[in-house]
Image (tube, rainbow, N blue to C red):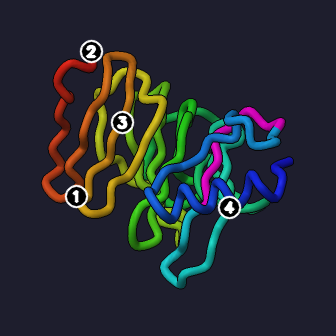
Amino acid sequence: MRTLVGHIVAIALTFIVGWAVPSSLPLGSAAASASAIALDRGGRARELSVRGHAIFAGEALLAGDRAAGARDGVAGEARFDGPAALAPGPRGLVYVADADNGMIRAVALESGAVSTIAAGLTRPATLSYDGPSETLLVRDAHGLLSIDLRRGLVTALPGTE
C-alpha cells in the first residue's frame, strides 16, 4: 500500500510531466504491478493498475481479461498479454505497453475501449507521454523509440540501441 507521500509524488509526476510512476519505485509500495493516476474526460482522477492481463480502475475492470491475447475491443472483450507499464495521456486516454504482444495500446478511461497504436515492438517495458509534442516515448528491448501520435510514426532514437 502506498504511503501518502508516495501518492503525492505519483500525482505530481503524473500531472507535471506526464510520467506514470510504477509501483516498483521505492514509494512505500509492496505491489509489483504497473500503476498510474490519470484524469478522465471529466477531470476526475482515476487510479489505474495492471493485474495479470487486465487493466483496473480502482477495483473495477477497465479493459482486458484473465486470458492472454491480442485483441482490440471494449472492456472485457479486449485482450492483453503482459501489460508492463501505463502512461496517462490526453483526453481521458491511458497508454499501455503490452510487452508480450510487442504493442502499444490506448485505453479510453470512460468506455474501456482499447485500440492498438503501434505493433512490431520487442517487449516494450516503459512509457512516457509528452503532451506538447503529442509523442509517446517507449523503451523496448532494442532501445528508445518515439511514437508521433499525430502522424502515427514510430522512430528509433539515435544512439539508444
Of the 4 image quadrants, the one containing the C terminus is top left
Q: Distance from label 2 to label 3 (Cα)?
A: 12 Å
> Which residue is identified by label 1?
133
Residue at 47 percent of width and 70 percent of height: 92
> Which residue is identified by label 2?
161
Lower sequence index among marks 4 and 3: 4
Q: Amino acid at mark 2?
A: Glu
Residue at 42 percent of width and 61 percent of height: 89
Q: Distance from label 2 to label 1 (Cα)?
A: 23 Å
- Answer with left or right where residue 137 lies relative to residue 57: left
Which image quarter: residue 85? top right
Q: Amino acid at mark 3?
A: Val
- Which of the two residues, 146 or 59, is positioned nearer the viewer here? 146
Q: Amino acid at mark 4?
A: Glu
- Answer with left or right where residue 156 lies relative to residue 81: left
Number of dots carrying numbers: 4
Of labels 4 and 1, the one closer to you: 1
Q: Amino acid at mark 1?
A: Ser
